[in-house]
Amino acid sequence: KVDVVEIFMRPEEIPPVVDQAIQIGAKVVWMQEGIVNEDAAEKAEEAGLTAVQNMCMRVAHKYFRAQGRI
């Protein structure tokens, strides 16, 4: 079971990855810092996934951990 699909690719290459994430039942698609694809994010969210764009997972984890949220 996949919870998060972390994406490190050019924005124009993301739509097929989002399609696969939807097919496998992932909960989140996470586009790393500097990566944005609004259409792919919208498609993911319409399918019930959370879409994160332009954010480093490591930085976010450190932030939320410091806040006591994880």
Image: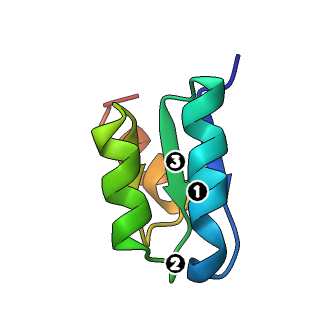
In percent of the image, x 39 and y 35: which residue is there? 49
Q: Residues under labels 3 and 1: Cα distance?
A: 15 Å
In percent of the image, x 56 and y 51: which residue is there? 18
Q: Which amino acid does label 3 sit on?
A: Val
User: Is 33 in front, or is 14?
Assistant: 14
Question: In the rendered view of the protein, which quadrant contains the N terminus?
Answer: top right
In percent of the image, x 31 and y 43: which residue is there? 45
Question: In the rendered view of the protein, which quadrant contains the C terminus?
Answer: top left
- Horizontal and vertical percent position of residue 9: 70, 74
Tell me the quarter of the picture where residue 32 sits.
bottom right
* Residue topped by disc 3: 29
Q: Residues under labels 3 and 2: Cα distance?
A: 12 Å
Are there few (<14), some (14-19), or many (20+) residues within 10 Å of tag 1?
A: few
Q: Residues under labels 2 and 1: Cα distance?
A: 15 Å
Residues at marks 3 and 1 touching, judged by CB atoms closer than 8 Å:
no
Element on which disc 1 rests = helix
Q: Which amino acid does label 2 sit on?
A: Ile
Q: What residue type is labelled 1?
A: Arg
- Horizontal and vertical percent position of residue 2: 67, 25
Mark closer to the observer (2, 1): 2
* Residue topped by disc 1: 58
- Horizontal and vertical percent position of residue 56: 53, 65
Instruction: Indicate whether 49 appears above or below 31.
Output: above
Are there few (<14), some (14-19), or many (20+) residues within 10 Å of tag 3?
A: many
* Residue topped by disc 2: 35
